[in-house]
Amino acid sequence: MTNKKKNDKRYQIVKKTKENMQNLGIYRNEFDATIRRYANLRLQYDDVQKSIDAKLKKSEDVSANMYKVLENYQKQLLEMENTLGLTPKGLKALQSKSMEKPKTSRLAEVLRGGI
């Protein structure tokens, strides 16, 4: 795949990921670096998957190492999707964190007249 095509695909992954997060109401600018890493990892995963598919089409043996790499990418992608809130588990974790009230000390409450 040429660099231009990879950059276009990377851009599309980043754009779609941001859109998904915005639709869920969880996107923040702080996620941009993680989203870019996620896009790069997705491209690497796609390259390995295409390589395996090409070997299988030609009836060639696929090394166990390639499957291990693919499995490792799958685990990393799932972890990043959880971090970004793109899975039910990750979304629940992000929403529960955003719903938490910030903890304040008793002294701060007294000074504000809360007690």
Image (cartoon, helix red, strand yellow):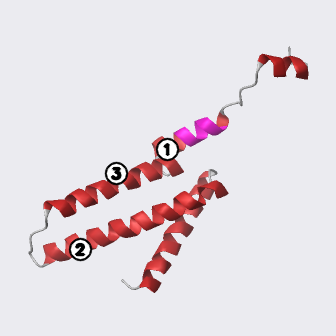
The residue drawn where x is 30% and y is 54% is: 72
Is residue 64 found left or right of 50 in the rendered image? Answer: left
Looking at the image, residue 56 lies above or below residue 4: above
Tell me which secondary structure the magenta stretch mostly adopts. helix
Quadrant position of the N terminus in the picture: bottom left
How far from the left and from the top, in percent, is residue 56? 14, 72
Q: Nearer the viewer, residue 79 or 21?
A: 79
C-alpha gap between disc 3 and disc 1? 14 Å
- Per the image, the residue denoted by label 1 is 90
The residue drawn where x is 53% and y is 61% is: 35
Circle 2 packing at 10 Å, graded few (<14), some (14-19), many (20+), is: some
Quadrant in which residue 42 is drawn: bottom left
Q: Amino acid at mark 2?
A: Ser
Disc 3 or 2, which lies upstream in sequence? 2
How far from the left and from the top, in percent, is residue 54? 20, 77
- Per the image, the residue denoted by label 3 is 75
Q: Amino acid at mark 1?
A: Gly
